[in-house]
Image (cartoon, rainbow, N blue to C red):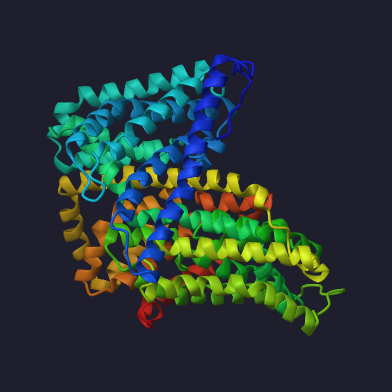
Amino acid sequence: MRVDTADVAVPAAGSMAARIEHGIGRFAELAAGSLVIVETAILFAGVISRYVIQRPFTWSDELASILFLWLAMLGAVVAYRRVEHMRMSALVDGAAPHVRNVLNALALVAGLAFLCLVMGYAYEYAHDEIAIVTPALEIPNVWRAAALPVGIGLMIILGLLRIGRTVAVRDCLIAAAIVFAIGGVLYLAKPLLQAMGNYKLIVFFVVLTGGAVLAGVPIAFAFGLGTFAFLALTTKLPLTIVVSRMDEGMSHIILLSVPLFVFLGLLIEITGMARGMVDFLASLIGHLRGGLRYVLLGAMYLVSGISGSKAADMAAVAPVLFPEMKKRGAKGGDLVALLSASGAMSETIPPSLVLITIGSVCNVSIAALFTGGLLPALVLALALCVVVWWRSRDEDMTGVTRASLKTVGLCALIAAPGIALPFLIRAAVVEGVATATEVSTIGIAYTIAVGVVYWLLRKGSPVAEARLDPVRWDRMWQTLVDTAALSGAILLIIGAATAMAWALTQSGFSRELAVAMGKIPGGATGFMIVSLIAFVILGSVLEGIPAIVLFGPLLFPIAKQLGIHEVHYAMVVILAMGIGLFAPPFGVGYYAACAIGRVDPSEGMGPIWPYLIALIIGTFIVAAVPWISIGFL
């Protein structure tokens, strides 16, 4: 979050507020980072006990589930302290400085309002769980549920400490007046809202929630405020239901693969595996016109198959290729345009976090999604290659030499472990060695082992030392903390979106939506076209995961009724959301690519459109030919 600190009173580093914030932050980071290690160990031990010694631990999944909620909430605390909760900031960043300051304060105050509203209900919910005993460990479920009030309480403290330190008091007062005014109007309009039927959904989930998202309020808190206000003002349901639905959304055991795959993605960077794959592709085709652009596409295809995190993918590839590409005359705008397009292209490559989320909330086979995601991404990659070929026809290749066969062979040997990893992950799931949740731990153990081998080779061979990047073991702890923060931000969105989806379902909206979508002219074809357009828009505003959690359970059953295979529909939806995510001016993925490439966003606005057109054409091909998604199931 960018703030103008001209009017902000920042106390000395040794002030009481600073010490409290630092203490909470250190505690949350230490606990959350340690939990990533513990969860990895528990799940990997479960694989070994079941598949190797054939004596499965009956308690491993239960213990992992208990600790998972703590990891999610403490990770959310870390992300909150670092101001890393996902938000749509395009409009905020383009506003005048004084308006931007107020909007940043509104993001803080609105988030605090939601946290304070649910804090009491979170405590009540955890208290009620005392009476429930877990089946395997036979301990009160409050040990798990207590993570909710603890995490919410810590975020409240951190938010209050931010007032007057990073956000001006004056701006916070203006923001508080706005929040109270909106709340007061809604409260006074309560009789009118209750008489509006389902039109009230527009007030809460389009005007209120949508307005909050556009104003830069973190997506999780915008969803939570809309859901809480809807249930409080228009129903008689106990408001602990908001917390229980959030718990349900965040606690699904399949979602434990989210932090573990994020960790795996960061590991391939610090061990040098990502660099090895990029170097191999560069040695193979880097001498061709547009060669390094093709390398970027190929590298994103390979790296996405390992990490599951778009930011990690782009951060692993761009710094390796961009300097040499600029030496060959490529402009920064074109580079970030291609990087953004490749990010959208690779959204379906397993183990994409969006694939895992769809499998969790829409009850689709993870193994089938992993199998079906490879060809759709390849179709889009080929479409992008056509644009690259056209743009690179006149590239100056003076001074560029072809790598020798010896160099290519050496690079291939170094890259082989990284190239093999996606196939190892997929095989482990398909062959039943590990579940979609557990397979990430196999990848983590494999990557660490490869990192040790690389480290030993660098110490023992001058040739290997020249070819291999240093293994950055010193970054391991920061990687664990970064994993927890990103995972907490993602999982809090999933929890809030689950609560909102439940509220929409209870209102009868899902039934009405099913009827309306079923009446779209053209049957399955019309439904697919409308879905494409809708998810491009949703992807640009909400990003993939919250959009899927909200609308996946509503739309996937309709697609199935119309005869559309659920894996085929999943691929089309994911690709559409990827286009929205990386399309300016709203797509946050585009701005992430600009930040990683250190290029002004305005430079890529023009060059990106040919790539987006290629992606749209490729997506329509995937939508029109189901075999591309389901031919190998």
Q: Nearer the viewer, residue 518 or 119?
A: 119
Q: Nearer the viewer, residue 300 or 612?
A: 300
Query: Can I make out residue 180 in this image?
Result: yes
Q: Nearer the viewer, residue 175 or 571?
A: 571
Q: Is residue 547 above or below residue 162?
A: below
Q: Is residue 612 left or right of residue 475?
A: left
**Residue 387 in which image quadrant:** bottom right
Q: Is residue 182 left or right of residue 71?
A: left
Q: Is residue 522 above or below residue 586?
A: below
Residue furthest toward the right?
399
Q: In the image, what residue occupies the spot 77% across and 73% down?
A: 395
Q: Where is residue 504 drawn, in percent x and y?
A: 22, 46
Q: Where is residue 77 drawn, in percent x and y?
A: 45, 35
**Residue 218 in which image quadrant:** top left
Q: Quadrant of the image for the N terminus?
A: top right
Query: Can I make out residue 602 in this image?
Result: no
Q: Is residue 144 above or below residue 15?
A: below
Q: Where is residue 522 drawn, in percent x and y?
A: 25, 72
Q: Where is residue 492 drawn, in percent x and y?
A: 38, 42
Q: In the image, what residue occupies the spot 64% across and 16% down?
A: 12
Q: Is residue 517 left or right of residue 28?
A: left
Q: Is residue 276 above or below residue 1?
A: below
